[in-house]
Amino acid sequence: MYIREANRSDFNDIMIIEKEAFPSEDVADLVGQLLTDKSAEPVVSLLAFKDDEAVGHILFTRAAIDAEGPSPSIYILAPLAVRPDHQRQGIGGMLITEGLKKLKEMEVEMVFVLGHEEYYPRHGFIPDSASLGFTAPFPIPEKDANAWMVQALTPEGFSKVRGTVVCADSLNRPEHWRE
């Protein structure tokens, strides 16, 4: 198993993974848009390989906080995909770990995710970011509040400004903010 940064020639592998991992092609379409969205750059796009076969993909896109003063450096994890025949083998966790490592090297301060309430906390994400003062780009229903999560990557992480997270243009649609 190895993980590396994705490049343009990996686009078909990425689309295969996304289409197999999610029942709707909407996620694959979103990934395709985010990979070419200038407002998402610089993206961190990683592929996991097993026996030279692409089996997992993770994408982090640049975001900001709409508040007084300068925004901390933040990213959104969306999506994480592992081919169904390779799930439950730790590949998703390895992709998260490697992605967070790269973001730390880039001096990113926080990472947000709207995701599974039991999975992401195992990887250091804190549920209910809104209770910490970080509102999602679109309203999250109260019953799903814990699905909006954050992780600080620096000691100063949560000590800076609070406000609404502003995501890349392609992700800035209400349909992408339903868990």
Image (cartoon, grey):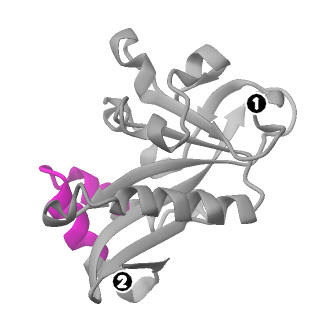
Residue 118 picture location, percent across and down: 36, 31
Label 2's element? helix
Q: Quadrant location of the N terminus?
A: bottom left
Overall secondary structure of the magenta stretch?
Answer: helix
In which quadrant of the rendered view does residue 95 lie? bottom left
Please give the label number shown on residue 59.
none
Q: CA distance from mark 2 to mark 1?
A: 35 Å
- On the image, which quarter does residue 174 sit in? top left
Image-based side of 151 in relation to 68, left or right: left
Disc 1 residue crowd, few under 14, some 14–19, many 20+, Cα 10 Å: some
The extreme right residue here reads: 69
Crowd tier of the residue under label 2, counting other residues whose Cα lies within 10 Å: few below 14, some 14–19, many 20 or above = few
Magenta highlight range: 14-31
Quadrant location of the C terminus in the rendered image: top left
Q: Which residue is label 1 attached to?
A: 158
Which residue is tagged 2?
Answer: 10
Which amino acid, mark 2? Answer: Asp
For marks 2 and 1 on the same chain, the one whose residue lies earlier in the sequence: 2
Q: Position of residue 122 (x, y in %)?
A: 45, 39
Q: Where residue 70 sits in the image (x, y, percent)?
A: 85, 39
